[in-house]
Image (cartoon, rainbow, N blue to C red):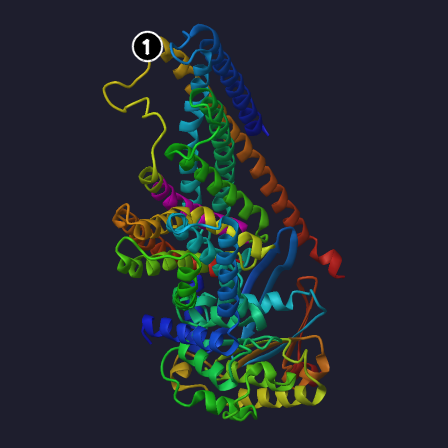
């Protein structure tokens, strides 16, 4: 079977697992909603202020919410030691990674779509810049989060204090991407500056780190 | 190096190539030695039971042959090669099911068959029937009884038609009757002919290595019995030779 | 035995030279160099701040090269890979020490020059992120399970190495408030020749100190690894007595 056939097999399995249990998407959704509400209560922003801070709040909410899903996505593999069966199978390890990262991309994107209306209502938002560009920024930013996030979650899989370690190693590495997605979103919402440079940053970041993740995943999976 | 290759070559032509071989293998976890200088060979077509208490190094030995852990010192060979290049020819099963709780047995088996590559071609159905499970069951594995889970796990291991089957404490969660049933299944598996391609490569039959701390259950499979303790092999006894004496 | 004596002699001589260089640099910086016109004596922080900042950008390279080497030969030659890992951990710790000093002296300078301890300017933020990256590297080493620490740390180091240029570019786009680079920044930059000796001697002194720390930490880590291997060897050899 071809490489992408394997990726698709993994992706389908992850979607199937989530469809049966629904725990990580529901958990993520509720968590992100809570963060959005808390920030709204804390700052009680006017429409103009909202535009300035909404980009940041949105991504902080998604970042925190995705930690829960990222850890969960590997815990599933560890239950019943399925991971051993994965490692024994002759399919390439990076296909397992790519399938899982794509599944996480779908989960987080779903959360974004559900969250969007609440977000617009609570923060009384409408974009002053080119709103359609959000359709470019959101997937790019989400991939930047889940690609490295899936990788680092696999890295912290067999460590002590797994839940703590994931944010500790993921956030410092992801900071330029976080900066990029927040700045781009703010630029689109306020219409005061051009998000182009930040989109280019996200593209470069994604290309660089997706490559490294694919190349090094085998090493991480077989580290024992 | 060259001599070793020649030895392998001659072993292959005479059909005596070991299914798995460990040469002076040690495994350390920090300062703790899980295996100490173990040298042992598992002949192709043989069936071996590894006995020992918890922590004797049985699981480490088996996981090392499976290629799941690398030795700190020494070398492991499976069919004369590094274990990770021979994954297609072996299967590993532990006392945990190694199946997804949320999927049905059939979905689990199909998934792993696809990862194994090639066509799925009814192998999952056959494997499930062979262990006495109904392929049409719609309950997810998470709701199976312990015995059913173990049988499904065995079906997952057998469906790829392995030449080398590694079983790590397969009876530990089973009652005596289920364990006996599993031994029967394994005895039946041993007699299955290997595929022609494998036979051309010198496979003499199917090799089973099984670890357990319940020796009486595995007796029918104990052609050879290895006893381990504190990371070393204490004794090797051969059932056939014992009988002659 | 003889070799270790040679090593410790070389180390001692190096330490003495280092301390001498630092002492000389300190004298030049605090006594000999002229007082700067606008900032007064506070400007003397510069002699410590700039060398440590420059050096804290250098040690991550050592860490990266050692980590890449570790990943490359951990299967073929595990013993040499362990040596590389010892270099990597030493370099990471020195990076954290030097970037901490750079951040602290920078804050002192900022308080005097700008009236604030901290500002989210490009260079400060980049340095802070560099510090965060290597602190998280050390956290990973501390929290991961034995046996896989080295591999995971080496992987993270590769990620950090790729991240650093992206961080610097993105922060630069984000904002710039730091004084333009003093050196190589254009025709109007550069310091007064009378300040040069103090500056150069401090760079030399602190670079030597950094190398000393690196080698010392490396030797410590090697000793720890050797002791671990000895203990392991003993537990392998001790087999037969225990078994019978």
Is residue B193 visible in this depiction of the protein?
no
Against A134, residue B120 (above or below) is below
For residue B224, what is the image quadrant? bottom right
Against A10, residue C16 (above or below) is above
Label 1 SS: helix
Q: Position of residue B244 (x, y in %)?
A: 69, 85
Q: Quadrant of the C terminus of chain B?
A: bottom right
Against B1, residue B13 (above or below) is below
Is residue A130 visible in this depiction of the protein?
yes
For residue A102, what is the image quadrant? bottom left
Q: Which residue is mark 1?
A: C193
Q: Is residue C152 magenta?
A: yes
The residue nearer to you, when weighing A213 against B159, is A213
Other residues around mark 1 within 10 Å, as few (<14) / some (14–19) / many (≥20): few
Q: Position of residue B92 (x, y in %)?
A: 54, 75
* Residue drawn at the location 49% of the way across and 49% of the way down: A43
Against A115, residue B95 (above or below) is below
């Amino acid at each position: 079977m071809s490489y992408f056939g394997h990726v698709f097999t993994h992706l389908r399995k992850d979607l199937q697992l989530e469809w049966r249990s629904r725990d990580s998407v529901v958990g993520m959704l509720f968590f992100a909603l809570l963060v959005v509400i808390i920030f709204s209560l804390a700052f009680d922003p006017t429409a103009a202020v909202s535009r300035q801070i909404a980009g940041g709040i949105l991504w902080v909410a998604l970042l925190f919410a995705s930690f829960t899903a990222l850890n969960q996505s590997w815990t599933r593999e560890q239950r019943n030691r399925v991971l051993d069966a994965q490692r024994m199978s002759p399919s390439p390890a990076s296909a397992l990674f790519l399938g899982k990262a794509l599944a996480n991309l779908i989960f987080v994107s779903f959360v974004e779509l559900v969250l969007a209306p609440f977000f617009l209502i609570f923060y009384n938002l409408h974009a002053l810049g080119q709103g359609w560009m959000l359709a470019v920024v959101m997937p790019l930013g989400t991939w930047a989060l889940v690609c490295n996030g899936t990788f680092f979650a696999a890295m912290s899989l067999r460590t002590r204090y797994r839940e703590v370690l994931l944010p500790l190693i993921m956030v410092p590495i992801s900071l330029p991407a976080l900066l990029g997605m927040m700045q781009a979103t703010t630029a689109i919402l306020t219409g005061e500056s051009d998000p182009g440079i930040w989109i280019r940053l996200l593209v470069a970041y994604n290309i660089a780190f997706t490559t490294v993740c694919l190349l090094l995943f085998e090493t991480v999976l077989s580290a024992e | 190096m060259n001599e070793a290759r020649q030895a392998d070559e001659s072993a292959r032509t005479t059909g005596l190539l070991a299914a798995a071989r460990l040469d002076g293998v040690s495994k350390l976890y920090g300062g703790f030695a899980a295996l100490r200088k173990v040298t042992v060979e598992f002949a192709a077509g043989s069936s071996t039971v590894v006995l020992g208490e918890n922590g004797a190094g049985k699981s480490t030995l088996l996981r090392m042959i499976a290629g799941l852990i690398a030795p700190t010192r020494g070398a492991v060979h499976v069919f004369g090669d590094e274990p990770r290049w021979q994954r297609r020819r072996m299967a590993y099963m532990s006392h945990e099911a190694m199946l997804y709780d949320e999927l049905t047995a059939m979905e689990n088996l199909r998934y792993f068959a696809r990862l194994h590559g090639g066509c799925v071609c009814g192998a999952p159905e056959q494997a499930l029937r062979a262990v006495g499970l109904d392929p049409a069951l719609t309950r997810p594995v998470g709701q199976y009884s312990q015995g059913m889970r173990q049988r499904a796990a065995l079906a997952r291991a057998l469906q790829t038609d392995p030449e080398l089957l590694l079983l790590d404490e397969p009876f530990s969660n089973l009652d005596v009757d289920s364990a006996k049933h599993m031994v029967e299944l394994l005895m039946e598996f041993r007699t299955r002919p290997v595929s022609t391609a494998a036979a051309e490569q010198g496979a003499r039959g199917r090799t089973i290595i099984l670890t357990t701390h319940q020796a009486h259950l595995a007796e029918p499979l104990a052609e050879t019995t290895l006893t381990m303790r504190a990371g070393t092999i204490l004794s090797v006894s051969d059932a056939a030779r014992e009988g002659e004496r | 035995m003889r070799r270790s004596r040679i090593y410790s002699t070389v180390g001692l001589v190096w330490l003495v030279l280092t301390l001498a260089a630092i002492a000389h640099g300190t004298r030049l910086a605090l006594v000999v160099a002229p007082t700067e016109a606008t900032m007064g004596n506070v400007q003397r922080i510069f002699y410590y701040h700039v060398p440590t900042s420059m050096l804290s950008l250098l040690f991550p390279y050592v860490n990266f090269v050692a980590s890449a080497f570790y990943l490359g030969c951990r299967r073929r030659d595990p013993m040499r890979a362990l040596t590389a890992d010892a270099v990597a951990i030493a370099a990471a710790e020195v990076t954290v020490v030097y970037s901490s000093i750079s951040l602290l002296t920078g804050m002192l300078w900022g308080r005097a020059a700008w009236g604030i301890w901290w500002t989210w300017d490009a260079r400060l933020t980049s340095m802070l992120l560099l510090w965060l990256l290597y602190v998280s590297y050390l956290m990973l080493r501390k929290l991961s399970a034995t046996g896989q620490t080295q591999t995971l740390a080496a992987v993270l180091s590769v990620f950090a190495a790729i991240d650093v240029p992206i961080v610097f570019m993105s922060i630069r786009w984000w904002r710039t408030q730091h004084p333009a680079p003093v050196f190589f920044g254009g025709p109007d930059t550069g310091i007064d020749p009378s300040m040069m000796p103090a500056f150069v001697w401090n760079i030399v002194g602190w670079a030597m100190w950094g190398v000393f720390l690196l080698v010392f930490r490396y030797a410590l880590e090697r000793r720890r690894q050797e002791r671990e291997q000895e203990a392991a060897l003993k537990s392998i050899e001790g087999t037969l007595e225990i078994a019978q």
